[in-house]
Amino acid sequence: MSNHMTSLPTSDLITQVKHSLSANAKRAYEIRLQTGNGGNLSGRIPGTDLIIIKASGCSFDRCTAENLVTVTLDGAQIDGDGMPSRELAMHLLIYRLRPDVQGIFHSHSPWTIACASLGDAIPTVTLHAKSKLGRIPVLRLCGETTEANLPAIAAMLAADRNLQVYVQDRHGIFSFASSVELARHNAELVEETAQIAWSMALSEQLALNRERDT
């Protein structure tokens, strides 16, 4: 734990954010939006530049108030015994560039990862996804979200200041919103949309194969 001297806000605010993170992590695990110990999520403590984030190596189903980590926007750890998620830099970048964002959710959701291979965006094939999310771009980067990949993420955010979600190729969903609950809801919608888009693409391919074989 860091000796950084930034003071913490009221305990009620901290408890509220930690409860929301824990509840949404468990919900994501229950519906298999994320399995194993992958994925991460975080929340901004309202009215502050402090971020609470899941500890590295902790699975969503074991995410509790006791094992969450608090950091400043410059990455200094001020509370929590574990190490923050390896993708902390990405979370902090989004919070710095988007003051409206209060929660971030990331999952390695299989339908979305599969569908990302089809093009430069997840097809918003349902009216619900199109109206709620708009475009869902696919970002092609090398490896997990590291410092080297931050400029590409920053450029994407600058190009669309209303962006709510993007997908990193072969990695998963990154959703950010006015609350971690809404970020998780949007990630669920991305995964649902990707499953429908993949199924439609498969159905079209099967139809083409049947025509070719007749």
Image (tube, grey):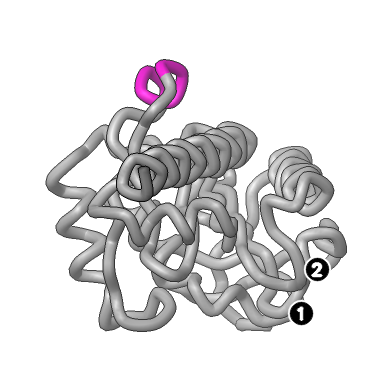
Q: Quadrant of residue 145?
A: bottom left
Closer to us: 33 or 46? 33
Q: Position of residue 205 (x, y in %)?
A: 38, 46
* Residue drawn where x is 34% and y is 40% of the image: 211
In the visual, does 13 lie left or right of 62? Answer: left
How far apart are the alpha carbons under marks 1 and 2? 7 Å
Mark 1 vs 2: CB contact within 8 A: yes
* Residue drawn where x is 26% and y is 82% of the image: 148
In the rendered structure, find residue 67 and report the number of the disc placed on it: 2
Q: Is residue 106 magenta?
A: no
Q: Position of residue 94 (x, y in %)?
A: 36, 54
Q: Is residue 103 above or below residue 181?
A: below
Instruction: Identify residue type, mark 1.
Output: Asp
* Residue drawn where x is 37% and y is 66% of the image: 169
Q: Which class describes the residues within 10 Å of circle 2: few (<14), some (14-19), or many (20+)?
A: many
Can you tell which of label 1 and label 2 is closer to the viewer? Answer: 2
Q: Is residue 43 above or below residue 61?
A: above
Disc 1 secondary structure class: loop
Q: Quadrant of residue 84?
A: bottom right
In the rendered structure, find residue 10 and report the number of the disc placed on it: none
- Asked if one can make out residue 176 in the rendered structure from this viewpoint, the answer is no
**Viewport quadrant of the C terminus:** top left
The residues colored magenta run 127-132
In this figure, which residue is indicated by the disc labeled 1? Answer: 81
- Asked if one can make out residue 145 in the rendered structure from this viewpoint, the answer is yes
Instruction: Identify residue type, mark 2.
Output: Asn
